[in-house]
């Protein structure tokens, strides 16, 4: 008889922790940047840290993204990294998920394989934070499986980095999964977008 309240307590605890987990992982608590100035967001961003993904080899270095506005209002996305000294890149298109929303929720579309575009892969790109000067940014998505910390500089100081990590943590991201991206002292020079495919 005495066991009943304990079991009930346990059940309540279980339900409560399940609910908490659901709240913690739901998309609703993501604060996405409103009225992003897309022109100011264009240009080069270095990947300072990210969650590891299947698309990026573990030993990739100097990972960076270069964004430019297309005539039709979409964004040209050029992602580059270097593996064993060899440049790898993929180009895609980013656009607003909902043109009527003021939130910086973008979709990014790549084709696989890049050389023979057959199979489109569409991902979410939510700008969770960008500083006033558009120098540092935190980018995630609804699943919280992806996270990128980006900067205009290839190296940022610890205080700035920790601040950005804290912002991601506040949004419910498991920042213990973050891996810092190795960046050379001097970033590789700008390369022709088309060239050097293998
Ligand atoms: C916009 O322009 C880019 C670059 O020319 C092109 O790749 C893309 O398909 C265009 N998108 C739309 C929706 O017109």
Image (tube, helix red, strand yellow):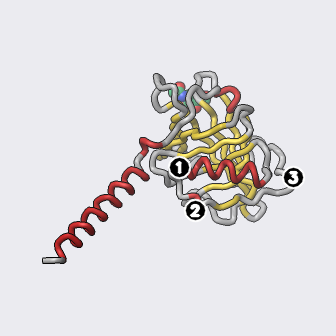
Q: Label 2's element?
A: helix
Q: Secondary structure at mark 1?
A: strand
The residue under the point 61% across, 28% down is 36
Q: Which mark is residue 186?
A: 3
Residue at left 83%, top 51%?
187
Crowding around mark 3 (Cα neighbors within 10 Å: few <14, some 14 to 19, many 20+) is: few
Q: Is residue 49 above or below residue 191?
A: below
Q: Is residue 197 visible?
A: no
Q: Nearer the viewer, mark 2 or mark 3?
A: 2
Indicate the position of residue 183 as horizontal and vertical percent values.
Answer: 78, 56
Q: Which residue is mark 1?
A: 112
Which label's residue is closer to the chain start, 1 or 3? 1
Circle 3: element type: loop
Between discs 2 and 3, the one toward the N terminus: 2
Q: What is the CA distance from the residue labelled 1 to the residue labelled 3?
A: 30 Å
> Which residue is more in the foreground, 111 or 133?
133
Residue 142, given in percent of the width and then of the height, sits at 46, 45
Give the quadrant of the C terminus: bottom right
- Residue at x-position 42% and y-position 41%: 28
């Amino acid at each position: 008889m005495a066991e009943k309240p304990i079991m009930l307590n346990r059940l309540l605890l279980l339900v409560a922790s399940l609910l908490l987990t659901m709240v913690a992982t739901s998309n609703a608590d993501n604060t996405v940047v409103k009225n992003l100035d897309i022109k100011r967001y264009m240009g080069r961003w270095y990947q300072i840290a990210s969650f590891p993904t299947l698309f990026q080899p573990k030993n990739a270095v100097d990972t960076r993204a270069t964004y430019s506005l297309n005539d039709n209002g979409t964004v040209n996305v050029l992602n580059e990294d270097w593996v064993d000294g060899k440049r790898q890149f993929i180009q895609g298109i980013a656009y607003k998920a909902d043109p009527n929303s003021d939130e910086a929720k973008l979709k990014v579309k790549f084709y696989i394989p890049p050389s023979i575009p057959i199979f489109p892969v569409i991902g979410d790109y939510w700008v969770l934070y960008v500083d006033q000067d558009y120098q540092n940014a935190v980018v995630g998505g609804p699943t919280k499986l992806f996270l990128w910390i980006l900067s205009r500089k290839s190296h940022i100081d610890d205080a700035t980095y920790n601040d950005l990590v804290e912002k991601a943590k506040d949004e419910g991201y498991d920042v213990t999964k973050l891996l810092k991206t190795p960046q050379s002292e001097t970033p590789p020079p700008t390369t022709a977008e088309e060239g050097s495919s293998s």
